[in-house]
Image (spheres, grey):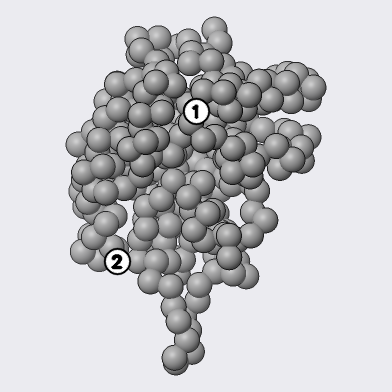
C-alpha cells in the first residue's frame, strides 16, 4: 500500500470542527527538527521508523476503553488511554456526548495497564483549567496526580504525560507542569517535532462533535506526506460514546493500514518519549 491509496478506505465526517484550529485547514508548513531522522549519506544508519503515530484516547469510557484495548491487542499494540482521577467528570462535562456512557475505574485501568497499555492522567474531574485561577489549577493537577499515585500501580508522576482536559492549558500552568510531570499534552499542531530529550510540550488536534474518522485520515495523510514526524491525534470513545467518536471497525482497519506502512510506528505518548527521547 502506498500513500496515495491510504485514504481510499477512510471514514466519513459528520461535521464539526478541529479543536485546536477553529475549523481552519491544517497547516502544511514544512519543518525540520534538529534531531529528526534524515536521508543519510551512504553508510549512515537511518531509523526505519520515520512516522510516529499516537492515537491519544481521552476520558475513560468503560465500554469503549475496554474495546480500544482489545483492538490494539489484536495488533500487538499498546493503547494510549487518558483517564480522570475521580472516575467521573464535573457537571460541565456531563453533556449529550458523555451522559449515557458508564465511566471506568482504576480496577479496569490497572488491568489494562497490566495487559500492556499506557494509562495517563486527564485531570481530576475534567475541569477546564483555563477557567480557574493558576493556584486552583495547580491544586487540581496535584490532586489528580495524587490519586494516580495512590490508585494506579507503579505510577510515577515524573514519567507521566498530563493530558489537559479540553486541551485547554495556560502559559503559567505550562511553565509549572514540567516540575510535576515528564510532559503535557495540549491543543496545537497535530504534528510534533521528532521526540527529543527535554521535550515537555506535546500538541494535538481533535475533531468533533461528529465522527472524527475523516479528520484523523487527513492528519495521517499530512504526516505521511512529510519526510518524518510525530502525529498526536486526540480522540475519545467508539461508536456513539464521547465527543468526536470513531467506529471500532474503523480503528481496526486504521491500525491494519498503519502497520502495513513500513515507516510507521504506533505508540502511546509516554512510550514514544521513553523510546525516542531518552537517548
Ligand atoms: Zn476529555
Give the residue number, with chain letter if any, for mark 2.
Answer: 262
Q: Secondary structure at mark 1?
A: loop
Going by the image, does 100 lie left or right of 159?
A: left
* Residue at image coords 64%, 41%: 158
Which badge, 2 or 1, is on the more N-terminal residue? 1
* Residue at image coords 41%, 27%: 109
Image quarter hosting the C terminus:
bottom right
- Which of the numbered marks, if any, corresponds to residue 210? none
Name the residue nearer the viewer: 128 or 10. Answer: 128
* Residue 31 percent coordinates (x, y): 57, 65
* Residue at image coords 26%, 42%: 73
Is residue 51 shown to the viewer in this render? yes
Callout 2: CB less than 8 Å from ligand 1: no
* Residue 66 percent coordinates (x, y): 30, 27
Name the residue nearer the viewer: 228 or 86. Answer: 86
Q: Residues within 10 Å of mark 2 (few under 14, many from 20)?
A: few
Q: Residues within 10 Å of mark 1 (few under 14, many from 20)?
A: some
Give the residue number, with chain letter if any, for mark 1.
Answer: 152
Q: Secondary structure at mark 2?
A: loop
Q: Which dot, 2 or 1, sits closer to the camera? A: 1
Q: CA distance from mark 2 to mark 1?
A: 34 Å
* Residue 40 percent coordinates (x, y): 48, 84
Going by the image, does 60 lie left or right of 13?
A: right
Is residue 225 shown to the viewer in this render? no
Residue 104 drawn above or below residue 213? above
* Residue at image coords 48%, 53%: 272
Q: How many marks?
A: 2
Amino acid at each position: 500500500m502506498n500513500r496515495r491509496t491510504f485514504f481510499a478506505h477512510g471514514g466519513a465526517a459528520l461535521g464539526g470542527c478541529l479543536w485546536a484550529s477553529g475549523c481552519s485547514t491544517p497547516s502544511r508548513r514544512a519543518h525540520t527538527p534538529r534531531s529528526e531522522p534524515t536521508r543519510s549519506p551512504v553508510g549512515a544508519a537511518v531509523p526505519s521508523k520515520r512516522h510516529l503515530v499516537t492515537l491519544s484516547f481521552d476520558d475513560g469510557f468503560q465500554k469503549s476503553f475496554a474495546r480500544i484495548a482489545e483492538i490494539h491487542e489484536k495488533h500487538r499494540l499498546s493503547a494510549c488511554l487518558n483517564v480522570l482521577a475521580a472516575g467521573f467528570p464535573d457537571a460541565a462535562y456531563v453533556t449529550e456526548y458523555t451522559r449515557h456512557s458508564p465511566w471506568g475505574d482504576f480496577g479496569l485501568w490497572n488491568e489494562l495497564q497490566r495487559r500492556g497499555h499506557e494509562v495517563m492522567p486527564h485531570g481530576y474531574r475534567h475541569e477546564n483549567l483555563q477557567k480557574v485561577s493558576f493556584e486552583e489549577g495547580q491544586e487540581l493537577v496535584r490532586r489528580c496526580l495524587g490519586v494516580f499515585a495512590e490508585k494506579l500501580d507503579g505510577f510515577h508522576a515524573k514519567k507521566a504525560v498530563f493530558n489537559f482536559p479540553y486541551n485547554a492549558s495556560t502559559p503559567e500552568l505550562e511553565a509549572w507542569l514540567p516540575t510535576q510531570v515528564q510532559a503535557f499534552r495540549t491543543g496545537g499542531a497535530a504534528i510534533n517535532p521528532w521526540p527529543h530529550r527535554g521535550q515537555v510540550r506535546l500538541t494535538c488536534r481533535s475533531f468533533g462533535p461528529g465522527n472524527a474518522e475523516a479528520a484523523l485520515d487527513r492528519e495521517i495523510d499530512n504526516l505521511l506526506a512529510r519526510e518524518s514526524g510525530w502525529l498526536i491525534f486526540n480522540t475519545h470513545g467508539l461508536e456513539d460514546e464521547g465527543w468526536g467518536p470513531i467506529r471500532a471497525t474503523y480503528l481496526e482497519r486504521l491500525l491494519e493500514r498503519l502497520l502495513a506502512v513500513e515507516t510507521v510506528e504506533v505508540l502511546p505518548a509516554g512510550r514514544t518519549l521513553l523510546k525516542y527521547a531518552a537517548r
